[in-house]
Image: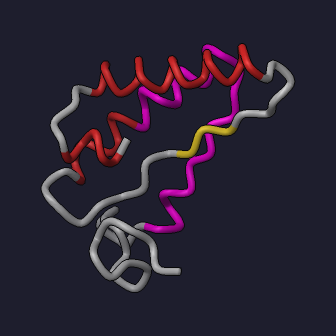
Amino acid sequence: GTNDLEFGVAHAQTVRNVCLILDRVSAAAPDTRVVVHAVLPRRDRYHPLVAPLNAALARVCGERDLEFLDLTVHFADADGMFDTTMTDDGLHPNG
């Protein structure tokens, strides 16, 4: 997800790729509980692309009856960007 944003991959292609992964997991281990996590906020020019991608991923999860875990609010500052107290580089959470 977040790497796809950086490399200019269209949201539709990212969603198709996620669907392929979900299909493979389902085929290999049909009883596996799958949770798809939202793409975290960013602090760069790709930040505006995160919410639409997350909306598309949430739709796919709804269609497939999968859990979509969106913790972005816990990582975001008042402007919705990645909170600087939680990241050193604006992309990866601190450990």
Observer-nearest of 61 and 18: 18
Residue 80, compared with residue 57, is above or below; it is: below
- Compared across the picture, whether 55 is left or right of 24 comes to left
Span highlighted in magenta in the image: 54-75
Q: Main secondary structure of the magenta part?
A: helix
Q: Residue furthest bottom?
A: 85
Q: Position of residue 15 (x, y in %)?
A: 41, 23
- Compared across the picture, whether 91 is left or right of 62 comes to left
- Compared across the picture, whether 70 is left or right of 39 comes to right
Residue drawn at (67%, 24%), measured in percent from left and top? 25
Residue 70, compared with residue 41, is above or below; it is: above
Residue drawn at (28%, 76%), measured in percent from left and top? 89
Q: Position of residue 82 (x, y in %)?
A: 35, 68
Query: Quadrant location of the N terminus?
Result: top left
Query: Per the image, is 68 magenta?
Result: yes
Q: Position of residue 56 (x, y in %)?
A: 42, 26
